[in-house]
Amino acid sequence: MEQDFYKRRLQDQQIEVCIPNDDDRAEVHRVIYQELCQGQLSAQSKQHYLEVIDKLAAQGAQAVILGCTEISMLLSSTDTSIPLIDTTAVHANKAVELALS
């Protein structure tokens, strides 16, 4: 999140980027690799992700990028009022678009 892969590209489009604090990033990372990548879904982890999203919204975030494809296993757009950008769907849609062109 704190590296330039997404951040710089978004900033190049005049999109302000908010990222979770260090502790929240560490827990997001832990959940991805120790739970989601292992096929485990936890209500507690989902609640933590929603709290992180709420904090970002309070900082002015108008949308949240689910920048790891496994996160969409835990969250969906119906879980929060802030728009979630699901990179799994973005990738799949682009692959279909390219395949059909």
Image (tube, grey):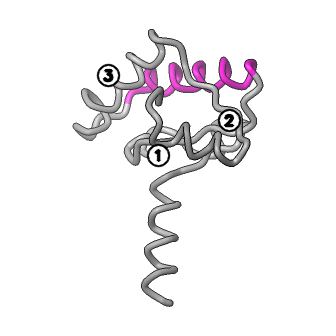
How busy is the neighbourhood of tag 2: few (under 14 within 10 Å), some, or many (20 plus)? few
Quarter where residue 43 is shown: top left
Between the C-alphas of marks 1 and 2, the distance is 13 Å
Q: Name the residue at the front extreme.
A: 12
Q: On the image, numbered disc 1 is attached to which residue?
A: 72
- Say which residue appears at 36% left-offset and 25% top-offset: 29
**Dominant secondary structure of the magenta stretch?**
helix
Q: Which residues are magenta?
A: 42-59
Q: Which residue is mark 2?
A: 80
Tell me which amino acid carries mark 2.
Thr
For the residues labelled 3 and 1, the Cα–Cα distance comes to: 15 Å
Residue 97 drawn in magenta: no
Q: Horizontal placement of 59 versus 5: left or right?
A: right
Q: Secondary structure at mark 1?
A: helix
Whole-Å distance between the Cαs marked 3 and 2?
Answer: 22 Å
**Dot 1 alpha-carbon crowd within 10 angstroms: few under 14, some 14 to 19, many 20 or more:** some
Q: Is residue 94 above or below residue 18?
A: below
48 left or right of 34?
right
Instruction: Give the amino acid at mark 3.
Output: Arg
Q: Does residue 56 sit above or below 91 in this rendering?
A: above
